[in-house]
Amino acid sequence: MESKRQQKYSKLIQKELGEIFQRESKPLVGKAMVTVTHVIMSPDLGVAKIYLSFLLADTKVLFEKINEHKKEIRKNLGNRIGKSVRSIPELVFFLDESSAYAQHMEKVISDLDIPEEEDDEDEEDQD
């Protein structure tokens, strides 16, 4: 269970990173949409686990690119929140697979061949 302080930092970092990916990281992410779906702070606030999901992108390639530019992203984050936090946490990125899984399950369900339920006419005859 995260403390109030961890939750406060998580929300701040999620908001700021979201804006960084939208505005300042266009050369890095191109036309892709990067969503910061979740941030979990370590109890000492030294590490932020950041879950990302992507649209309009080769997920694996973009994820690797973001990891390669982690220092630059952390520096941008520091420029934004440096005055309100004691230290900028280490950033650890993870792929949030939940939306991809949801899309997969939606396709599986839509591809199922479920016969239509027949109306029981017998029920009406019993009146």
Image (cartoon, rainbow, N blue to C red):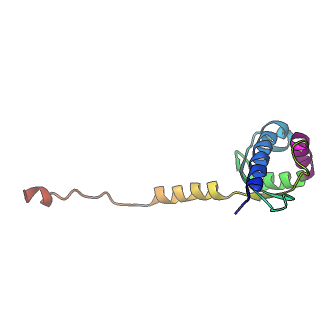
Percent across and percent down for residue 94 are 76, 59
Depth check: 45 or 98 in front?
Answer: 45
The quadrant of the picture occupied by the C terminus is bottom left
The residue under the point 84% across, 57% down is 45
The residue under the point 48% across, 59% down is 109
Q: Is residue 108 visible to us here?
A: yes
Question: Magenta residues?
Answer: 71-82
Percent across and percent down for residue 48 are 81, 57
Q: Is residue 117 magenta?
A: no
The quadrant of the picture occupied by the N terminus is bottom right
Residue that extends furthest to the front in the rendered view of this protein: 4
Q: Quadrant of residue 118?
A: bottom left
The residue under the point 14% across, 59% down is 123
Percent across and percent down for residue 73 are 88, 47
Could you tell me what secondary structure mostly forms the magenta stretch? Answer: helix
Q: Quadrant of residue 42?
A: bottom right
The residue under the point 79% across, 48% down is 13
